[in-house]
Amino acid sequence: MTGARTGFDKVVASAAEAVADIPDGASLAVGGFGLCGNPIALIEALLAQGTSGLSVVSNNCGVDDWGLGVLLNAQRIAKMTSSYVGENKEFERQFLSGELELELTPQGTLAEKLRAGGAGIAAFFTRTGVGTQVADGGLPRRYDGAGGVVIASPAKEVRTFGDSDAEYVLEEAISTDFALVHALRGDRHGNLVFNRSARNFSPLAAMAGRVCIAQVEELVEPGEIDPDSVHLPGVYVHRVVHVGTDIEKRIERRTVTEPASSGTPSGTSTSKEG
């Protein structure tokens, strides 16, 4: 399968077909915020075809049995670039044992690195991380399994601009071989609409991938999405897979509150379904 679909119709028949040309060692930008908006059909198709040695850029790595966690459990991921990794015990085990490389990145910086990669911007300066190991270097990226650091983050360029004494650290953009995202709605041209907090990282991940594959709950015809409602234009999307509205979703951590007027609990969650 070539990177882009011929013509304007970008719909492919199945998730398996959509990811069939992702090779071992590929780099992936994957959408999702917590367990919200995880492209689980594409992830499971990638798991089924046996692709390994992946370098993955995503806000997080799912949990032990969901999202990117299913690839991690199968030891298909060689490196993660993430901003939050605190809900996955297997992630912790692999990282501390030296099986997994981690490039820990501030959340806003990660978002901008992905956006810059999609916008053709090579690098940018930000104040985030100045005066810390993010700028100075030394953050562990890979352990040796006995507590020693085999790979540490390098120091980055820090500069001031104009008459200000404020320092800024140079961050390079991220672009990847492929991107995998989940959208609430999409048309055959690849225009996408995301649901609530699933919009946080998904458009940015999609932009960063040289080939973007989107799974959509609702597939509509071109023109059925109001142009003002499009969150990501189809120019960034190369393949669309219709997965239906009954696709399984999970909530990362559920909490309940008791309304003052009654004793009946009402459910809330820290990670909404996407």
Image (cartoon, rainbow, N blue to C red):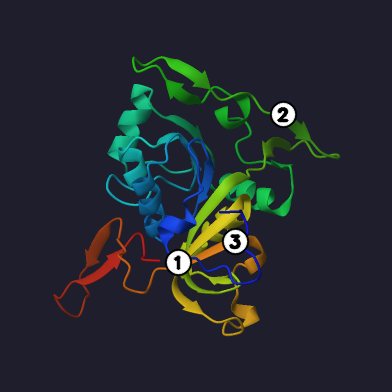
Task: Please name whichever residue, 91 or 20, is drawn nearer the observer in this view of the structure.
Answer: 20
Picture quarter containing residue 236?
A: bottom right
Mark 1 burial class by Cα count in 10 Å: few <14, some 14-19, many 20+: few
Mark 3 residue element: loop
**Which residue is identified by label 3?**
238
- State the separation of the CA atoms marked 1 and 3: 14 Å
- State the separation of the CA atoms marked 2 and 3: 35 Å
Task: Please name whichever residue, 6 or 71, is drawn nearer the observer in this view of the structure.
Answer: 6
First reached walking from the N terminus: tag 2 or tag 3: 2
Front label number (1 vs 3): 1
Left or right of residue 42, residue 1 in this image: right
Identified by mark 3, the residue type is: His
The vertical placement of 135 against 40, above or below, is above
Residue positioned 63% across, 43% down in the render: 174
Residue 108 appears in the figure: yes
First reached walking from the N terminus: tag 1 or tag 3: 1
Whole-percent x, y for residue 194 in the image: 50, 69
Left or right of residue 177, residue 13 in this image: left
Q: Are marks 1 and 3 in contact (CB under 8 Å)?
A: no
Identified by mark 1, the residue type is: Ala
**Which residue is identified by label 2?**
157
Mark 3 burial class by Cα count in 10 Å: few <14, some 14-19, many 20+: many
The vertical placement of 200 against 51, above or below, is below
Front label number (1 vs 2): 1
**Which residue is identified by label 1?**
13
Residue positioned 54% across, 41% down in the render: 27
